[in-house]
Image (cartoon, helix red, strand yellow):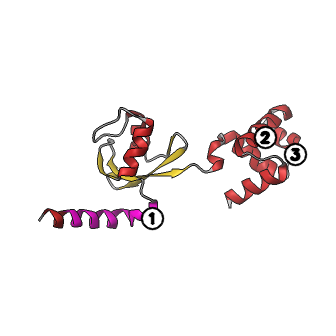
Amino acid sequence: MPHIAAVHRIARLREMLGDPRDSGERWAVADERGFLREITPAFVHCLRLLWPGWRGSRLPETLHTAVRDALPARLGSQKLNVEARGIYRFLHVTSLHPLDLLTAREREIVARFAQGETHAGIASSLGLSPATVRNHIAHCYRKLAVNNKAELARRVLQDTQ
């Protein structure tokens, strides 16, 4: 009878989560306190890469707030998405989007720049100096690995649509 219980558990999970295969193989289900209820081997691998000493049925302490409040978190070069599903949280790991590498201020500035605003226009509307805006844009060029305004605009506008 254990196989019937396992099939029933999987069927309940798929109903609760939607088909977890749509989210890749790196997913888990935890409660609000960070105790893991279901977990895939690939999700375990992600956790152990960042927390080599991690073992057990509870998520690492640094993830508790994100899980409790159902907020996304960064896991190195990846992103932990957390979705509230009643008393449980559906956790799945995805690759970071290039724009996720930018700070909120950088995203705001680069979006305006990509739409054609000038350094001076952005600076006056945000209460910054043009040199500060220029520095933020330079950081964005490096982080997004682009070489000119056209590439930057294409990357930013394509990724926000």
Image quadrant occupied by the C terminus = bottom right
Frontmost residue, 2 versus 158: 2
Gap between marks 2 and 3 measured at Cα: 11 Å
Question: In which quarter of the view is residue 108 placed?
Answer: top right
What amino acid type should be assigned to the residue bearing mark 2?
Answer: Ile
130 in magenta: no
- Near mark 3 (Cα within 10 A), the count class, few <14, some 14-19 or many ≥20, is some
Q: Nearer the viewer, mark 3 or mark 1?
A: 1
Per the image, label 3 sits on a secondary structure element best described as loop
Residue at image mark 1? 22
Q: Residue at x 38, y 43 (%)?
A: 68
Image position, residue 8 (x, y; %) = 22, 66
Which region shows up in magenta? Answer: 6-23
Residue at image mark 2? 137
Frontmost residue, 110 versus 26: 26
What amino acid type should be assigned to the residue bearing mark 1?
Answer: Asp
Predominant secondary structure in magenta? helix
What amino acid type should be assigned to the residue bearing mark 3?
Answer: Thr
Image position, residue 122 (x, y; %) = 82, 42
